[in-house]
Amino acid sequence: MKTTNKLSFSIPEKLAFVKMIHSIIVADRVIHKKEIQFLTELSHRLNFELSFVQQAKTMDLYQSQAILDKMEKSKKETVIQVLQEMARIDGIIADQEMSILLDLFNHLSISLESNEE
């Protein structure tokens, strides 16, 4: 997760990012201690308060995907990397987590390809 130290995310980007992270955390209906620890670590790296999660939870999933879609490629790659790490943090990627990941990856892949230089 070191890549998040190199990039600066705007407030809307952070909200969208945290919305997707929250979606992964609650997807399997079990919140693991490791997921909370990872979220806490991520909050320090991205410079947001954990109360920020409450704001992100109210964001529409499609709205968050649209914001992420507009980000530069390096930020999208970081989001994908972090979400994959979050999904694996408890030792298994649940079907629900995989579904969220695949939906986002499919959504962002068009833009990732079109933004290549």
Image: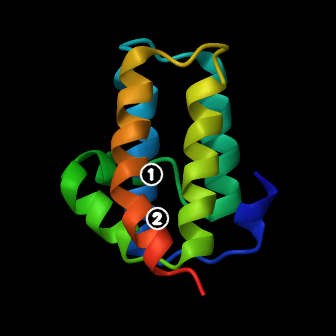
Q: Is residue 2 visible?
A: yes
Residue found farthest to the bottom: 117
Q: Is residue 98 above or below residue 66?
A: above
Q: Position of residue 43 (x, y in %)?
A: 61, 52
Residue closest to the eye, 108 or 25: 108
Q: Is residue 6 above or below residue 57?
A: below
Indicate the quadrant where residue 70 lies: bottom left
Give the left or right position of residue 5, taking residue 62 as reference. Answer: right
Residue closest to the eye, 35 or 72: 72
Residue at image location 36% in from the left, 14% down from the top? 29
Question: Local crowd at mark 2 within 10 Å, few (<14), some, or many (≥20)?
Answer: many
Q: For the residues marked 2 and 1, what is the alpha-carbon distance in whole angstroms? A: 6 Å
Give the left or right position of residue 78, taking residue 99 as reference. Answer: right
Q: Position of residue 26 (x, y in %)?
A: 38, 25
Residue at image location 40% in from the left, 46% down from the top? 20
Residue at image location 38% in from the left, 66% down from the top? 110
> Residue at label 1?
18
Q: Position of residue 96 (x, y in %)?
A: 36, 21
> Residue at label 2?
14
Q: Are marks 2 and 1 in contact (CB under 8 Å)?
A: yes
Disc 2 marks a residue whose amino acid type is: Lys
Residue closest to the eye, 13 or 47: 13
Which corner quadrant holds the C terminus? bottom right
Secondary structure category for the residue under label 2: helix
Q: Position of residue 46 (x, y in %)?
A: 63, 63
Disc 1 marks a residue whose amino acid type is: Val
Disc assigned to residue 70: none
Residue at image location 59% in from the left, 34% down from the top? 86
Q: Is residue 53 above or below residue 30?
A: below
Question: Local crowd at mark 1 within 10 Å, few (<14), some, or many (≥20)?
Answer: many
